Image (spheres, helix red, strand yellow):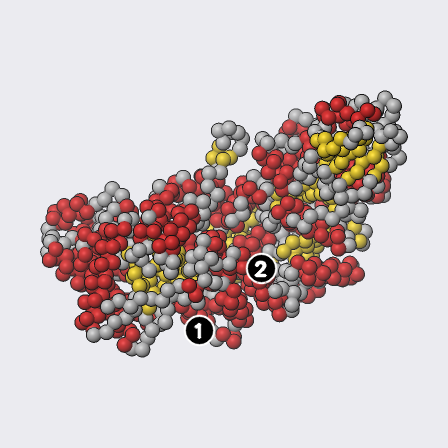
Amino acid sequence: ARSSAPREIRNHSFACSHSIMSAFVSSAGALVARVVGSSVVSLPSLSRDNSLCPSSRENDLVRRTFLSGGKMGPATFLGRRTELPALAALKSHVPMIVRNEAPDGAVTLEAPKVKQSVYAFGPGAPKAPVDRNLLGGKGNNLCEMANFGIPVPPGFVITTESCNNYRAEGRKLKDSIRDEVRAAVKFLESQMGLKLGSAENPLLVSVRSGARVSMPGMMDTVLNLGCNDKSVVGLAKSTNNDRMAYDSYRRFIMMYGDVVKNVPKKLFEKAFEALKEAEGVTSDVDLSVDGLKKACDVFKKIYKDNLGDDFPQDPEEQLFGAVRAVFNSWDSERAQVYRRVNDIPDDWGTAVVVQTMVFGNKGDTSATGVGFTRNPISGENTFYGEFLINAQGEDVVAGIRTPQPVNKLQAAKDGIDLPTLEELMPEVYQQLVDTGKLLEKNYGDMQDMEFTIENGKLYMLQTRNGKRTGFAAVRIAGEMLREGLMTEKGALRSIQPDQLTQLLAPIFDQKAKDKAKDKLVAKGINAGPGAATGLAVMSSAKAVLWAQEGKKVVLVTEETSPDDYPGMVAAEGILTARGGSTSHAAVVARGMGKPCVVGCSDLVIDEDELTISAKGMTIKEGDPIAVDGTTGEVFFTAVTTSPSEVVQVLINKTKKEEDSALFQNYKVLMELADKYRTMTVRANADTPVDAAVGRAFGCEGIGLCRTEHMFFEEQRLTDVRRMFFSKDNTARVSAISRLKKYQKEDFVGIFEAMNGLPVNIRLLDPPLHEFIPHPDEELAALVPVLDMSLDELKAMRADLEECNPMLGHRGCRLGIVYPELTEMQVSAILEAALEVEAKGFDVIPEIMVPLVTAEKELQHQKSLIMRTANKVFEEAGRTIKFSVGTMVEQPRAALCADALARHADYFSFGTNDLTQTTFGISRDDAGKFVPLYIEGIPNPEHPNELMVILQADPFQKLDQEGVGQLMELAVTKGRKVNPSLKCGICGEHGGDPSSVKFVQSIGLNYASCSPYRVPLARLAAAQAALDNPQKLSDAALPGAKSWM
C-alpha cells in the first residue's frame, strides 16, 4: 500500500510489520491513535494542508511500531470525519475498515492485520516468539540468547515463511518484505549507532541461513556485507585497523561473487595465492596491508571480467542480493541431497539471519571458533572445540587452516602441540565454558556454539544442539540423564534411531591392524568413528559414479566443501589433509555416521597426478586405502573388520557385558526405549539363526517368516524345482512331500529360538522366476534328477514362464491351485509346534495367507488350514493354539479389508508389494527413473528450476499420502468388523524411523524389520509413542484362538 501512496503519506505513515497506520487530525489539530491492547500514543501532527509535519517523536514512534512485533494491531484511529479531508485519499491507498461512526462525526478505523516477516533481537528489541519453525533454529536461539543477556551481536531474522513465499512468487522478494527489512536495518543502525555503507561509521553485517533443524554447511553465508570502496576507508579509520578493514573487504568481494553471483571461488583463491607468493608468504595473516588492498582491486576485476558489471557499492543492493542467495541455497543440490538423506521436508524453507559483524580478524587478541559443551566424537563430558587467532568464521569450518584446540586436555589427547585458548585467553575461555553450561542447561542437550572474540571480548554467534556420533549420542544421553540435565523423554529424543547403526557397524580387527602396521602411513584427527576400507577416490563426482558401479570408496581430499556432500554420502569413509574436528568434513561425517579422519597433514595429495603420498609411500586413485575414524589412523592397504562391541556381547558372546562401556550405555538406552514404547517390535527371520539374532537384539516375536527363503540351499532348491517341473499331480504330491522335512526342521529351530514369542509364518509365496533355472546349463542339471529329457524340461519351462512374475501365479494362488502345498506347510508348522511344545517350550504360531485380493481366496485357504489342523491334532491326540491372518499387500485387499477381517485374526501389511502395486512401479526397474524423480527434473513452467516429483524413494520410506492412506483405511474398515483385529507391518519399511512413526499414528500393534534393525525400530517406536500415543491399547488385543 505504501508504494502507491502520496509521497508525504509514504514517507511518514506508520506502515510497519503487522499493521498499517496513518494519522488523522482531531479538532485540536493533534493526532491520536488508540491501539487495541496498548496505551494511547501521540503521532506526528498534520499541517493545515493535511501534509504530515516532522515530529521530534517520529523516530521513537517508528522504533516503537517496529518493536511491537506486530502485536499492536489491529490499530484503531480516532478523528472527526468533517476534519479529515484526506480520508478518502488515505483509504484509497491503505485498506481500512470503518468500525464505528459516532453521532458527533468521530470515526473508528481499523487496519487489517498482516503477517510479520521480520523480527529483531538484541538490546531494546522485544521478545520474538519462541518458534523455531518460524525463525529457524539459528534465529530462534539467537533471540533466546539475547533474552538471557548473553553477549550476542544484534540483528534481525527474516522468517522461513518469507522463504517459501519467495519460492512461490517466482523467486521475487515481495515489496512488503523489502519494507520490513529496510525498517529492521534502520532499527539495527539505531541500536549500534552505525550506518550500513557509511563512509564514517560503517555498519557491517553477516547474512546467514537458519533452517528449523541444523543443516551444517548445506546453505550459503555472506560475511562483511556493507563493505564498499568508501566504507572500507571509514572502517579502517574508525577501528584504527587497516589490515582488518581490507581483509574484510577482500573476503566480502570473494564471498559475494561466489555465493550471490556464482563467480568461481577458485578464481579468487588462485589470485590470492599469487599475491602471497609475490610477497614470499604462505599464511593469509602474513600478507601486507598493501597486498590486501591489491587483493580487493584484483577481486573486483575478476568480478567484472566474469559478470560484465562493477562490484555493487550500494549496501541495499548487496543486502537483498545476499538474502535472495540464502533463500536460493535452500534448493541447492547439496541442500536437497542432505534433506533426502536426513528426511527433512522440502517445504520447511530457511530463515535468514542478518547480524551485526564482530571481527575475529582484528589481531592477536581476536579470534573465532566453534565449541561443544561435550566431546561430539566420544561423548566425554569435557568442553571441546577449536579456534583460530586473527581469523573469521569460515576459516575454521572450511578447513583452510588447521585450527588450535580450545583447551590443554584436548591438545594432549589429540597430540597437537599448539597454544590453546585456555592458555592464551584464560578469562575468555572460562566465560565460554560457563556460557556453554548455561545453554546446555537451558536446552537440555549438548550444544554446538559458534563464537568470535573481538579485542578480548566474547560474542556468541549461534548455538544449536550439536551433531554427534552414535557412540557420543548414547553416552551423552545416559550421562545427562544421570546429571538431571535431561529427562528420560529428552534423552530418547536426543538420539536419532539411525545413529544406532554406528554402534552395530564393524570395526577394524586388531590382528588385521597389527598385520598392516607397515602400511600405517599417517595419523590425523579422529572425527567420525568406525572403520572404512575402499578404493581411494579424489573427487566427489567420481565417488558418486564409482559407488553407483558397486565399488566401495573412500573420499580423499585436501578439504571438503558443501559441494562435496553427494560424494561424502556415496563414500564409505572420508579423509582430508586439512581441517579440524569442527571442519565441514568432520561435522557432516559425524551427522551421517561415516568414519572420518581430518587434518592429516602428513598426506601429500597431488590432484594433477591423482596420487596420495605419506611416509615415503605413494598410492594412486583407485588403490585400496583404510581409515580408522576412532583412532585417526590411515593405512595404504585394505584392512579387514571385526564385529562391533555390541555384536560381540549380544551375538558372538566373545566379550563380557561388564567389559564394554559402550554396550552398557546401549543397554540403558534400550531399556529406556522399551519403557516408553507402546508398539511391539518384531523381526523378519527365515532361519533359526536369524531368529536368534533378532531375539538377541530384543525383538518380541517374528513378524515375517518367508518360507520360500528356506529353499535357496542347493538340495532344497532342486526339490522345489522338482515340484514345479512335475508331469502330473502324483509326481507333484511326491515332490511336495520331500519339502516337508526341510520345513519342519526349520520351524522347530525357529520355535525353539522364539520360546514364548509369536512366530508369523507366511505360506509359500515364490515368484516363479526366482526358482526356475534360466540358463540351459542349469536346466540340463535337472535331467538325471527328474528323469526327463532336456527338450521336455525346456517345454515345461516355457509353459511356466510369466510376463509379470510379481503379479503372476504366486501367493495364495499357488495354494488354491495346488491345495496339497498349503496342506504340507500347515502340517509342517503345527507338527513342529507340537514337537517343540512337548519339550517344554511355549510356542505361539501364526499362519499367514499371502497375496489375498478377494474374500473367497482367504475363505478357501482358511478352510484348508482348519481342515489340515484338525487332521494333525487328531493324529497327535492334542492341540495347540494358533491364529490365522492375511498379508495386506494389494490395493484391493486394503479396499476390501472389512470382508477379509471376517476371516482373519490379524492383518500384516506387506508394504514392499503394496508400494509396487499402488504406484505401479516395479522395484526392479525403479532405479531407472525414481532417482531422477527425487533429484528433480526441469520444470516446464520455470526451466531454470527443478521439479521434484517424489520427496523420497517410496521403497525406502513409506509413502504416507498414498500407501499410508490405504493402510489406514484397511485398519479402520477391518476393526469395524473385527474390533480385536491385530495389525502390523512386515515390509522393509518396518525398520525406517519415519515409517514407524506413521504406523504408530494409525494404530498398528507392531512393526517388524530385519534383525539388525530391531534396535533402531525399538528406539523409533519409543519416540513415536512420545509424539503420538497409540490408538489401540495392547490390552484390547485378542488372545490366540485354539483350533480343534
Image check: 503 left or right of 466? left
Where does label 2 land, which residue?
494
Q: Amino acid at mark 1?
A: Thr
Query: Which residue is at 55% across, 62% downward?
Result: 492
Position above or below: 686 against 129:
below
x then y, percent, for residue 1028: 52, 56
Where does label 1 land, which residue?
654
Image check: 1018 left or right of 483? left
x then y, percent, for residue 43: 84, 34
Tell me if label 2 and label 1 are in contact, CB under 8 Å: no
> Neighbour class for label 2 at 10 Å: few (<14), some, many (≥20)?
some
Image check: 414 left or right of 80? left
Quadrant showing the C terminus: bottom left
| Mark 2, secondary structure of its residue | loop
Q: Is residue 139 visible?
A: yes
Image check: 589 left or right of 295? left
Closer to viewer: mark 2 or mark 1: 2
Q: What is the quadrant of residue 597 in the picture?
A: bottom right
Q: Is residue 23 visible?
A: no
Q: Amino acid at mark 2?
A: Ser
Foreground residue, 76 or 533?
76
| Mark 1, secondary structure of its residue | loop
Position above or below: 121 against 648:
above
